[in-house]
Structures are given as structure tokens and as C-alpha cells.
Image (cartoon, rainbow, N blue to C red):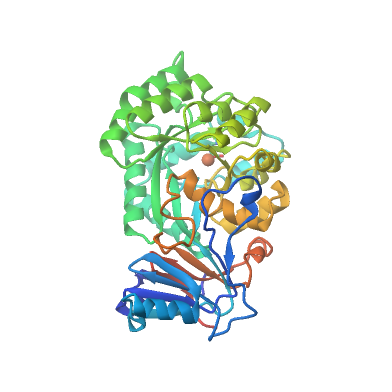
Amino acid sequence: MSSLRLIQGGRAAEGLPGLLVEGAAEIATLAGGLRRGASQDDVAIVGATEGPSAEGGQVIACWEGRVLAIGPRPELEQALEAGGYPLSRFARLDAMGGAVTPGLIDPHTHLLFAGSREAELVLRQRGAGYLEILAAGGGILSTVAATREASVDALEEHGRRWLGEMLAHGTTTIEAKSGYGLDLATELRLLDIAHRLGVAGPIDVLPTWLGAHAVPAEFRSRPEGAEAYVRHCLDEQLPGVAAQGRARFADVFCEAGVFTPDQSRRILEAAARLGLQPRLHADEIAPSGGAELAVEVGALSADHLAAPSTAGIDALANAAESDHPVVATLLPATTWFLMHDDFAPARTFIERGVPVALATDFNPGTSPTTSLPFVMTVACLELKLTPSEALAAVTINAAHALGRGDEIGSLEPGKVADLVVWRVPTHRQIPYWPAADLVRTVVKAGRVVLERAPA
Ligand code: NIG
Ligand code: FE
């Protein structure tokens, strides 16, 4: 981190509209759309050359923030000149024999919260269950108490800090959930901060309303408290969130002891009517009907899925054959950090043709990590994904999990020029060096936003 330099606003390629990325040992373009089944393992590599030849190799040409073309240097340079893109209008970025991939996309984070919960780690070591801690008023609820107290400045500063960490690990777009307010004012505050952090950049932030993350303390004491809180979500929070216009998605923690499938359905259907696309915390701890519900409401993504039922897996497999596949967004760092034995059945999903994405689930209770490369490592070791499947999961499939598959997630002409130059020659080494700092340069919309200072 210390040797990485954040370039405020991005280096505008020396004031030039174009950027040529050259000298890559490998470019994993991820071209070709959503991955599922056997294609999840295909990262569409171009230009694996013998080495970082300054004369040859494949070059990525970016223009005004978008990918213009990728091709072998001589042909590409000729075509650019002939096509009205003079080479003098391009800055050059030397990948120095590193691999180049699309910018990583984190489709499930709880970016904004106050405080920390290291005490729970020790409670869980001693045998306490995650949902047991929540039922006793701790867990999510202790973060809610701290977050309600926090100032806008403190939350913003926290957001900037952790976004900086994400960028240093190669992330260029994230989804960020609210869900630590659980009252209208605090939920709106979190959504607004997430939105503003995204506008400030360089990471794009897509806000999700997660008002139904837990039943807050003031409703628990009431009879039928959960039901009363669901009605509060429907009658107060949702209209307020829709009127504010910051959230793009709605999410619910559908799990035994939190929200039932029926409550989750009512919230997600009402949200969809107000233009918020559904996504879902589904079957994180035990089969809870979450995967089935995600398909039923046409969610973009069903997340966690560490414990789906057979019917839930069948539902996702059927949806994968339809025009509306639901992406299985798996969060293996959470299972690992909770010290649970049962990881999501990722190989079954891939065999059944279900598209798989990965995310950090960054949050103070179950996954305090911002590193997608680290999540890729856990996915390879515990979910048995190949390194290529894991890369597809944090790029093109993660883009589809956010409904942005046409804009980001692959390096193809016309798409946003978000890319990472790695300090390893092949994407297969990204999960292979656990917890290492592997990022050399990050380009966001054609601008260099982070670079490792020369040694
Ligand atoms: O995805 N399980 C629900 N939400 C988060 C954890 C939030 C927390 O513990 O603070 C998750 O695991
Ligand atoms: Fe989560």
C-alpha cells in the first residue's frame, strides 16, 4: 500500500485523449459475455507473447475513456493512424511484462459502517453462532448502534479509506449496501454517502438499499416486531429511498430467524415496483428458500448460497437456461471467516450451468476484507474454482450481477477502459500468491488512477 500512489482525479494521460497499454505478457480480455458452465473457465486471452517485447505483442488502445481496439502493435498502430486517431494523441503505459485484466468488480459489499467487531471473533472461537450473537442483540445490531451515532464526515472518511484499499487490490467498481441504519434517516444518509463517494471516484459505487438487514432493537421489543418492521420498510423506508433516488438495487437478508421468504418477497416486489432491482442474501447459513425466491422475483443475483436446498439449485439451473439468468454471487471469505465447514457448492453451480460471480462481502462481522484477489484465493482453495473461473467471477460475471455487463467487466471495443496491470505475468498467479500486493497500475475510464512507484 505504501508504495502505491493514488493519483487524484486520474492522470489524464498527459492531457491526451488516448492511452496505449503495451508490453503485457498476457491480456485476459474476458470478451464474449456472461460465463457459465465450461465457458466460465475461458478468460479470452490475447497476446500471450514470449515476453515483454517493446516491438511486438498485443496493445490495448483506449480513447476518451473507452476501449477502442486490441491488436498486434504494427497493425493496430497503422489502423489507428488511418482511422483518424493519430499516435501522437496517445500516452503510453508499459505493462512491463505483467498480465492485464479488466478492472475487478466487487458486486457485494457493506462498505459503510462505524466501529468494529473483533470481540465476536473470540466469541465464535468459543462456540457462539453468528445468528445466536445477532439474536442476543449483538452482531449487525451493534454495528447499527455505532453507525447511527457516527457523523457523516466520519462515515465518509471510513468509506474513502476502505475504497482506497479496494483500489490497491485492483477493484474499479463496487456495489455498496446500506443496512446499518435500519431507520429511514440513517439509511438515506448511508445511501447518499455511498453515492457521493462514487461520484468522487475513482471507484464507481452502485448503492443498494438493505433496510431489511435485521429487525432493529426498537421493533424487537414489540409484539410481532419483525412484521411491524417489514411494514415500516414497505410504508416508510422504501418510498423515502425511492424518492431520494440514490439506490439502484434492493436487498434483503432472507434467513431463518431474520426475514422469511414471504417477508423478503413482499419487500423485493414492492422495491421492484419502485424501480429498485432485487438482489438477495440467500441461504447463507441454512437453506431458507432464498435461492428459490431469487429466481421467483427475477433477482439479478442470489448471494452467499453456502447452504442452498436441492430445489434452490434446480431453480437457479432452470433460470440459467432462460432469458433471465440469476448470477450466483459466492462469498467464500465469509464462510472462511465464520469458520464454517460448508462452502457454497460452486462446482455444482458450474456443472449445472449457473453463472458464478465472487465478491468480498466486506463488512465488520463476517468478512472484514476488501481484497478480491484474496477472495479468489479462497475460491480456488475452498470452492475449487480454477484461477480462470475465479477471474471470470470477479470481472464479466460480477458485471452481470450488477446489470452492467454491457458496459464493464471485459476489455472489448466500446466498453469502459477499466483495467489492471499486474506484477505477475499470468492471471493464474493472481490467486496463487495469497494476500500479496500484486497490483502495478490501475486504469479507470482510460485514466491512470493508481500506480506503484518505481522501486
Ligand atoms: O453478508 N448476513 C448478513 N449480512 C452480512 C453480515 C453483516 C454483519 O455481520 O455485520 C453478510 O454476511
Ligand atoms: Fe452481505
Among the 4 quarters of the image, the one containing residue 374: bottom right
- Image x and y of residue 411, in percent: 48, 62
As drawn, which residue projects farthest toward the bottom?
55
- Image x and y of residue 96, in percent: 55, 80
Which of 158/274 is in front? Answer: 274
Residue 90, compared with residue 147, is above or below; it is: below
Residue 10, compared with residue 198, is above or below; it is: below
Q: Quadrant of ligand 1?
A: top right
Which of 281/225 is in front? Answer: 281
- Image x and y of residue 71, in percent: 49, 73
User: On the rendered image, what quadrant is the C terminus found in?
Assistant: bottom right
Residue 54 visible in the picture:
yes
As drawn, which residue projects farthest toward the top?
223
Residue at figure coordinates x 36%, y 54% from the top left: 198
Residue at figure coordinates x 63%, y 40% from the top left: 353
Is residue 53 shown left or right of residue 449?
right
Residue 5 visible in the picture:
no
Among the 4 quarters of the image, the one containing residue 51: bottom right
Residue at figure coordinates x 63%, y 63% from the top left: 430
Is residue 389 shown left or right of residue 296?
right
